[in-house]
Image (spheres, rainbow, N blue to C red):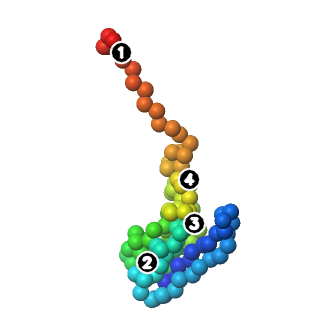
Amino acid sequence: MTLTVKDLEYDSLGCFKDEKMFMSHPRFEVIEQANNTTYSLAASVFTKDIDRGFRIAHAMEAGTMWINCANQTEISMPFGGFKQSGIGRELSEYALENYTNVKAVHVNIGIRL
């Protein structure tokens, strides 16, 4: 089995610059290389063994993981990256946190001051 991992590289203005690909047989080596990158927006793993796909997905430091597909989004699933790939999440209930502030208001309704 050969695993391929892509790392997108950006310039100082955040514009896409390059895409790095890692290929290797031992999956732990590939996962280590992929997790040792600056950006971690999303990753895909293609495998006939779904259990292996889930193990790899859990080991990867990526905000979104796809197993046997790529670039598929669903409005109810959060989308966002780890590390330098962004702050917060888009889509789903998690995105609402970006647009709300929590405030606590305490009211004394029975004790005289």
Disc 3: which residue: 72
Q: Residue furthest top?
A: 112
**Residue type at numbered disc 2:** Glu
Q: What residue is shown at x 43% (from left), y 30% (from top)?
A: 104
Disc 1: which residue: 109
Question: Which element is circle 2 on?
Answer: helix
Q: What residue is shown at x 45% (from left), y 68% (from top)?
A: 61
**Residue type at numbered disc 4:** Leu
Residue 5 location in percent, x, y? 53, 79
The answer to whether the residues at label 3 and label 1 have Cβ atoms under 8 Å apart is no
Q: Residues within 10 Å of mark 2 (few under 14, many from 20)?
A: few
Cα distance in 3D space between marks 4 and 1:
40 Å
Disc 4: which residue: 91
**Residue type at numbered disc 1:** Ile
Left or right of 81 in this view: 14:
right
N-term-proximal mark, 2 vs 4: 2
Numbered badge on residue 92: none
Residue 78 location in percent, x, y? 51, 56
Residue 32 location in percent, x, y? 43, 78
Mark 3 vs mark 4, foreground winner is 4
Mark 2 vs mark 4, foreground winner is 2
Q: What residue is shown at x 66% (from left), y 68% (from top)?
A: 11
Front residue of this view, candidates 19 and 74: 19
Cα distance in 3D space between marks 2 and 4:
29 Å
Mark 4 vs mark 1, foreground winner is 1
Asked if residue 54 shows in the view, the reply is no
Numbered badge on residue 32: 2
Asked if residue 52 shows in the view, the reply is yes
Q: Residues within 10 Å of mark 3 (few under 14, many from 20)?
A: few
N-term-proximal mark, 4 vs 1: 4
Left or right of 16 in this view: 95:
left
